[in-house]
Image (tube, rainbow, N blue to C red):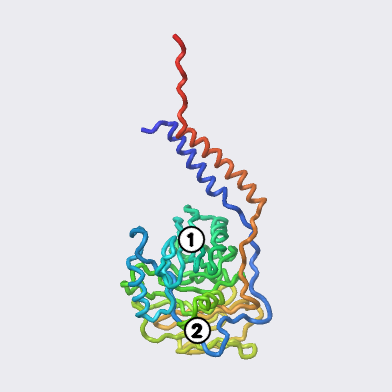
Amino acid sequence: MPSKTKLYGSFLLLTGLLLLAYGLPPRYDYSPPKPFHGQGWYNPFEGESLRWSRANFHIHSRTWGGLTEGRQSPPEIQAAYQKLGFAWIGISDYQQVNPQSPIPLYEHGWSVKKVHQLCFWPKEVVWVDFPLPQTRGMKQAILARLRPTTPFLVLAHPHFLHSYSGSDLAQLGGYDAVEVLNRYGDSVAEWDSALSSGHYAPILAHDNVHDVTNPHELMSRWTEVALPAGASQEALQEALRAGRTVGYKNRTPAPITSAYPQLARVAFTGETLLVQLTFPADSLRLIGQGGKVRAVAYQTDRLAYLPQPSDTYLRLEAFTAAVELYASPLVRGHPARRGIPPVAWGATLLQWLLVALPGLWLTGIGVRKLFVRRARPTSATQ
Ligand SMILES: [Zn+2]
């Protein structure tokens, strides 16, 4: 049985480490939400004709000796998606860039609450993470660490285990896009929170497949990019950043093989926004500030709307029996993104003093009680 001293030492060590983990990460000075504003509109789909190519950037292959989920090898995965006409495939193994992935990327994160990020075209793989439930400061610190290592940084599945809340997305800075649709949880409300705060975050949608032979997984969600299939990866990167993307959710139990509505034209005629689809949908709607419905149309392939002064962003949704369509937003002014906020040094120093320093002290005592043997007092001479 462990001695009382050992038990006491373990308790002090764990408490100390916990205080250090939560006391050390910096605090940030988040700027208040600043909804999109300006006279003109930024329209990512501007142009005469739109050509679409299909993409999925969240795929897990068999790796890490089977420790992580993922059943197939990259060639088997590629074959499955090529059969379905996908132009862009990214294998997003955890904490490593798969050399056989056509688009180089990886999924960062090993925390219990699955606060994950998709890092595209990374310069390095970052192992730093906070394994316990993360404070907003910790989430921001991770984005600050990842930001210089990747040109396209995506918050993965925010709704999954509530890894990122809507208010997180409204305050954090340094991310480029949101994975709004994911088989483990769709995050439409969280996305609207980001957009309402004035942060330009285009949509990505992925099936997060672990087994490509399971028809319920494969193509349950996917992204369409307004880009010809043979374009360069530089052009793909530019299109993703610019928000030339539409996310789809499959409402049927198997991959979609029939035609489904795509955006044919998104343009202003005078002051009026005109959206046209390639096929009629059961319903079409425009969503704006605060996630509010701004316009609806039924059994049609088009919708016209005169934006009001209170409209800061507008994004399109369309619904058929087979699919749900979510387009990246049009925004007033410029597609601005918040950068990494400055560190709030006053609050950080106070936190170091009140939390981290006592943590260090307790850790020290814990280590001494557990590992440093006390010299036995030498017995007195007889
Ligand atoms: Zn994940």
Rendered residue at 43%/62% (across/down) = 96
Q: Is residue 217 left or right of residue 324?
A: left
Going by the picture, which residue comes out furthest to the right?
39
Q: Position of residue 209 (x, y in %)?
A: 38, 69
Q: Position of residue 66 (x, y in %)?
A: 33, 60
The disc at residue 284 is 2
Q: Give the position of the C terminus as an image quadrant.
A: top left
User: Amino acid under label 2?
Assistant: Leu
**Nearer the N terminus, badge 1 or badge 2?**
1
Q: Is residue 257 left or right of residue 161?
A: left
Instruction: Work out whether residue 55 or residue 315 is closer to the camera in this orientation and state it.
Output: 55
Rendered residue at 47%/42% (across/down) = 14
Determine whether the residue tagged by mark 2 lies in a helix, strand or loop: strand
What separation in Å lies between label 1 and label 2 (alpha carbons)? Answer: 41 Å
Indicate the quadrant of ligand 1 in the picture.
Answer: bottom left
Of badges 1 and 2, the one in the foreground is 1
The disc at residue 19 is none
Instruction: Work out whether residue 295 or residue 372 is closer to the camera in this orientation and state it.
Output: 372
Rendered residue at 45%/29% (across/down) = 373
The local crowd at label 1, few if under 14, some if 14 to 19, many if 20 or more residues have their Cα within 10 Å, is: some
Quarter residue 219 falls in: bottom left
Task: Find disc 1 in the rendering and name its residue.
Answer: 125
Instruction: Work out whether residue 292 or residue 123 is closer to the camera in this orientation and state it.
Output: 123
